[in-house]
Image (cartoon, rainbow, N blue to C red):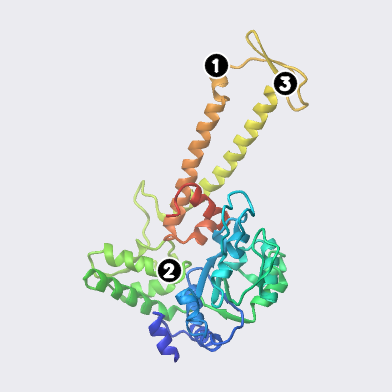
Amino acid sequence: MDIQQIKQRYDIIGNDPKLLLALNKAVQVAPTDLSILITGESGVGKDVFSRIIHENSTRKHARQGRGLISVNCGAIPEGTIESELFGHVKGAFTGADRSRKGYFEEADGGTIFLDEIGELPLAMQVKLLRVLENGEIMPVGSSTAQKINVRVVAATNIDIVEAVRNGRFREDLYYRLNQISIYLPPLRERKDDIPLLIRKFSSDVAEEYHMPPIVLTEEARRMAMDYPWYGNVRELKNITRQIAVLETERNITPAILQNYISYVPTEKMPAVVEHPAAGQITDRELLLKALSMGQMINEMRQEITDLRQAITQLASHTTQIQGGYQISDAPSHLPAGNWKLHPEEEDFVTPEVIEDQTVALDEREKHAILTALNLHSGNRKLAAKELHISERTLYRKLKQYNLDQ
């Protein structure tokens, strides 16, 4: 199958030399059993390339269509990741009422795609290295190794070489995974492909909803090509679909496009950017508020934790007397003598009020997360970066607040 056929089959749009080089390499290595490491930013299509590699290999018919198992290493809690990858036997831990296959055993004979491999904890990196070197897995709670035949395709959006240098990723595992490397360029490195992608996504929406496709004016086309597209193809597709569905005007001008993108370099479009009306909050200001809120939430949570500890410590040295409280045998940082609290102060330090404060913080944290996700069209990596938290923490928060649907 030649490159043009591959592009048509997998809906890959673009003629950028870096993209074509990546496609050529994927097709060439697909028939082999070499481990592949795909690098590139979030949203560039690493999962599509894993399918290209698998479906053009001799493993494509393995296990009745389950030959490719995709695993997001960053989305699995650290405490369960070993069981998820390698399985467990009955009674291995509390709640293990039956044996369960892991992803590697499910992919036996086929391919396993380990996305976000850079998020894998160091302890699991050691165990994964043993699997790659020996072709054996050890389910949790088992004392018997099990042979498997799995081809590994891994992907990461972090600078993996820098992670190795900083000790966050094992060098021996890096070289074991990186038998062949494939780099997928971000959209800002393939600007000429951006209008082609917009036309493709617009045509898809037009066909799906029976409406005329949108067309960018020359100025809007230049604006789209100058926009950095940090969410890459995923962001471009989302925004194109939004414009196609929401706008009644089919000729898209820079003023219309500006309403859908969160960052516009003002030096590129002096005639388009306008000052917001009085009282109107821009997307950029909203994002800054979200970032500030995230930092404030962390600080306030720490203050509440310190307050709880201080109250507990104070209570252990306090006895009630008429008109107030007496502190005896107090730690050095607590003043000895009599304390008299006003009624409203006594109410403030009750556990119930502290709990109310925590609930309020949870709501503000949830709002900050939703705001960051909305501003980045649902891109979790960018939202996590803006909130100054890791992707793993963001996944946990989404599950905590039931936002991961």
Q: CA distance from mark 2 to mark 3?
A: 58 Å
What SS does tag 1 mark? helix
In the displayed orientation, state which residue is furthest to the bottom: 2
Which residue type does callout 2 highlight? Answer: Arg
Image spot of residue 222 (x, y percent): 38, 75
Q: CA distance from mark 2 to mark 1?
A: 56 Å
Residue at screen point 27% across, 62% down: 246
Q: Position of residue 215 (x, y in %)?
A: 28, 74
Disc 3 marks a residue whose amino acid type is His
Q: Quadrant of the N terminus?
A: bottom left
304 vs 23, nearest the viewer: 23
Which is more N-terminal, label 1 or label 2? 2
Badge count: 3
The residue identified by callout 3 is 317
Mark 1 Cα within 10 Å, few/some/many (few <14, many 20+)?
few
Residue matched to label 2: 234
Residue lying furthest top: 322
Compared across the picture, whether 314 is left or right of 281 comes to right
Task: Say if residue 216 shows up in the picture.
Answer: no
From this view, report whether residue 349 is shown above or below residue 249.
above
Residue assigned mark 1? 343
Q: Which of the marked residues, 2 or 3, is nearer the chain's N terminus?
A: 2
- Label 3 to label 1, Cα distance in Å? 20 Å
